[in-house]
Image (cartoon, helix red, strand yellow):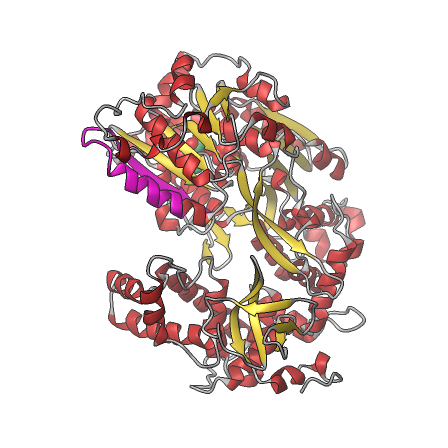
Amino acid sequence: ALKGVSRSHKISDSGPHSKRLKKRERPWVDVSDDELHVKRAKKGTGDRSKNLNGSPSKPSALESKKKAKIGHPSRHLANGTKQASIQEQRRELPITSGKDALLDEIRDNDVTILIGETGSGKTTQVPQYILESGISGKGMIAVTQPRKVAATSLATRVATEQNTSVGGLVGYSVRFDEASSEDTRIKYVTDGMLVRELLGDTLLSRYSVVIVDEAHERTLRTDLLLTNLKSIQKTRNAPADAKGKGSVAKLNPLKIVIMSATLDAEKFSKFYDNAKVIYVKGRQHPVTIYHTAISQPDFVDAAMRTFFQIHTDQPPGDVLIFLPGQEDIESLDKSIKLYADRLPKDSSGIVVCPMYAALPPGQQAKIFSPAPQNTRKCILATNIAETSITIPGIKYVIDTGKCKEKRYIARDSGTGFDTLLTKDITKSSAMQRAGRAGRESIGFCFRLYTEESFKALPDSAEPEIRRCALSSSLLQLKCLGQDLEQLDFMDKPDWEAIASALKTLYLLGAIDNQKHLTKLGRDMAVLPLEPHLARAVVASQECGCTLEIIDIVSVLSASSKLFFDSTDEREAAAEARRKFRHSSGDHMTILNVVRSYQEIVASENKSGRKEWCKKQFLNDRCLSEARDIRDQLREVCVRMGVDWRSSCGDDEQPVLRSLVRGLVQQAAFLQPDGSYKQLMGPSIVKIHPSSSLCDKKVPAIIYDELVYTSHIYARGVSSVPRKLIAEVSVFKNKNIG
Ligand code: CDP
Ligand code: MG
């Protein structure tokens, strides 16, 4: 069987449909033969590859039977039968056999570290075991996830396993969305949400067990939690006499479970005073790995060609393609659908399912439900499908070798900035990705990079705390009375990044020149927003335009962009947008869009809204998400005693004044030569072509972000009177009015 794969993965005319397809209709023959020549990976490249390619135990008869069930359960089973099948799936997970031993360890130890192959049942089962065993007592169980979409989909799955609907016994809580009630005992939360909960409940006293999942990802929030949990546990689990008499004495002890899919558990164990590490043996079938002979600069195109080769030449089995981000996923989605239409009528069908962090919950179900008869499912995912979620039915993995990485570029002036760039993955990611193909039976992984490139990859990623902006976390820690510089972290953040965050918070007025938290800073921290946007909302109270600022900030906080940068219909898009344009620039333009959208929402149903957005070249997903965010922010305002209804009508001055307060570090002045120079940094910037101010020369601008291409572009730009900038207290002594 392997011989066949090796041959047919070459770009060749030998596919089953080649005779029937005219040459120019075949997407994958327009390249030379050697361009994507694939050879088998040598055994023993890297530690884990041995593991995957080695000879793990053959699947038993039981497992093969199960494969059919997990991979393709009938969608039309009666409810009772479906529940029975789900319970059977649960029983057959690798973790089931270790259940009692695991519970004994958790009962006996304050901290337990659990390592297990992706798909062994850690995330879905361990919380249920703990609940059913009574270990959690009266308290709740929190399970943290680095990503929103994983938290919501896992909660839904576990609720189904408990035969309830999500929001009851099993709930979730992520930024701008929550489903929980008084009955909730297991709560899937993003790591960021749990850090936020610390602000209101510094000892997390509602929880008796906190499970830190996907710990190997080492997100900034996970690291903050690991640090805080350690000290919380010291307080809560101290012997009764040491706790004294106060309220602390009544506290229930805290159990911590750290779960990870990778083997480097030593570091976690050391951090938690040599905590016990438990391994669950996963069920991993051999995966054959292929590399390309030469590198593939256009990885989206290479992924498409590889997919169609699999589709036309290979036996049934779903395909999982790893891509860096949403844009690449959307573009590949489009081209696969386009070419699928050109396949002969009698070829088997294709369903394409995207999966990325910003995917709306409604669209997630498609990924887990089996494809119809005679159809191949093709999942296009970011690294979320590496370990966070297990998708059944995958036999083929196509790995582009790319991911997006957040990185903060610190600068002496304090005006650092975040970048989100596509970059090469790590060896550890590559092995995880390959492993996804061997969950249910033998699998195949096609790497769209050479074996030499693989060998040159770094072993594992740098923890986020070493490469991300810290201002938001620093503010939260200040509210907890903690100092970033003095905390006990697994990896300490860079001094430069700390200095930069301190400077940002100082310029926003969140801390004073003694680095003490101000009243303003405390107010800002209550808002679930980036500090600069939170500052604008707080400023809007004084300026009497909270209604408007919340509308704008909600759009800026949504996970997708408001305007499509459509290249095909640029003219039509510009024409459609013209009516929303405001002379002051992009922020007021956003407000005009939101106002028009609100009128449409009042008069049209969902499909009418979508239709309207399409006509205006607006992203309806962004607008509807922004509405949810807006509602959340209004609720927070009510709790803070802020009147979110205060409005400035059509006067843009108060809106710009509030925005300037938040965007102090994102301002630039016009130079005699027509370029703009940053007020608080060294860079010369241009206004981005997508901006409504693109070819205008105005004395001063503020902007949402910088984009680095051939030039440094400012995106999301408004023209502001210089005097508004001069009003900001930190500039008072400078002569810029
Ligand atoms: O956390 P870990 O990777 O060890 O496994 P898990 O997420 O608990 O997944 C255990 C099993 O549940 C997998 O085989 C998944 O296929 C299944 N599952 C599912 O069918 N639907 C979901 N939404 C989540 C998990
Ligand atoms: Mg998991």
Residue located farthest toward the left when viewing the structure as drawn: 345
Task: Name the quadrant of the C terminus.
Answer: bottom right
In reply to whether residue 687 is colored magenta, the answer given is: no
Q: Nearer the viewer, residue 329 or 606?
A: 329
| Residue 387 placement (x, y as % from top left) | 52, 35
Q: Is residue 310 found left or right of 58 in the rendered image? A: left
- How far from the left and from the top, in percent, is residue 282? 53, 23
Where is residue 417, by image quadrant? bottom right
> Residue 612's spot in the image, x, y percent?
27, 66
Res. 493 in view: yes
Q: Residue at x 44, y 19 (%)?
A: 442
The stretch drawn in magenta includes residue 334: yes
Quadrant position of residue 631: bottom left
Depth check: 544 or 38 in front?
38
Label tally: 0
- Residue 2 percent location from the top left of the image: 42, 14
Is 89 left or right of 16, judged from the image as shown?
right
Towards the viewer: 227 or 18: 18
Magenta-highlighted residues: 330-356
Q: Nearer the viewer, residue 707 or 611?
A: 707
Does 173 sit above or below residue 391? below
